[in-house]
Amino acid sequence: MIDVSDPRKSPEDFTVPPEWVSFPTNLAYRRYETNWIQRAIENTDSGFSDAYRLGSAIMGCDVILFRDCNELEPAWLKLLEELYQKPVIPVGLIPPSVTLSQNDVTELALRLELSGLPFIWALRKPPGSTESDSVELPHGFLERIKGRGLVWTSWVPQLRILSHDSIGGFLTHFGLNALVLVEKKVGIQIQRYEEDGSFTRNSVAESLRLVMAKNEGRIYREKAKELSELLFTDKNGEDRYLNQFAESLESHGRLHKS
């Protein structure tokens, strides 16, 4: 069961790997990523913290589902089962919905332009959004990247695109999972300011050039290609995880009734 006496209390405590990880890892939060942890451990108006709510939900459930896969994080998924003492079921890498602010879109657009690299950008409105929620690309951006970049605002077959041999890199908002990819040398994190997590000048463009074009980025390209063959070229992979998920629910449902 999860250790409710976890001694980590301050944001700084989360900038080093936790002691309960049973295998070698450098995985830890950056300083700017610990701000949400501080908010999570503080009591809300209800008198309970978000961390307490999460712990209570985990303790009270029969099965834990993760948007993850064994090909990417087998050791971490096994560790969670040991900590929680209940089944942890990966449901595959169903793409998340990430909402970007106007500033995010502007900065990413200008830095993609600055990189000088060809790209496809899937920039869709979140489900249920209205015109007032929409964001705009910088003035003249589409004209300046014409013939080199493509901005697509409707549905795209993401897995099919990522499995194509001509794809050299993938820029995403991936949260803590990004640190796992860095540890596996599948990708790098874009350099940010430690205090607030904002991008440093030219950091997006330089990161893209490193992993896609420079010789020192060869190891990332090789590792990414190796992993992509497991995650993106297996046409039945996602269905397999979803079927496993459904079968697990049926199995636990029968056990619960009995």
Image (cartoon, rainbow, N blue to C red):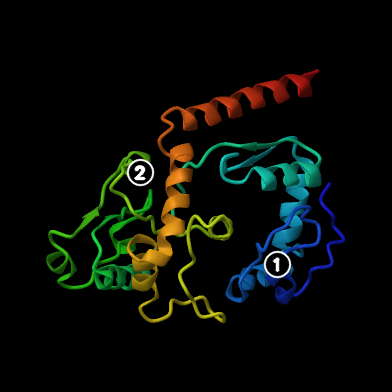
Left or right of residue 1, residue 64 in this image: left
Dot 2 corresponds to which residue? 158
- Judged from this view, the residue extending furthest toward the right is 5
Residue 44 got which mark? 1
Using a 10 Å C-alpha cutoff, classify the residue at mark 1 as few (fewer than 14 neighbours), some (14 to 19) or many (20 or more).
few
Residue 99: tell me if it is visible: no
Residue drawn 55% across the image and 25% down it: 243
Left or right of residue 150, residue 58 in this image: right
Quadrant of residue 119 in the image?
A: bottom left
Instruction: Report the quarter where the C terminus lies.
Output: top right
**Label 1 amino acid?**
Thr
Q: How many marks?
A: 2
* Residue in front for this viewpoint, 162 or 127: 162
- Residue 45: give x, y in percent of width and height: 70, 67
Residue drawn 59% across the image and 59% down it: 183
Residue drawn 46% across the image and 44% down it: 226
**Label 2 amino acid?**
Gln
Q: Residue 234, relative to residue 147: is it above or below? A: above
* Residue in front for this viewpoint, 197 or 74: 74
The answer to whether mark 1 and mark 2 are in CB contact below 8 A is: no
- Residue 123: give x, y in percent of width and height: 30, 56
- Residue 41: give x, y in percent of width and height: 73, 67
Element under disc 1: loop
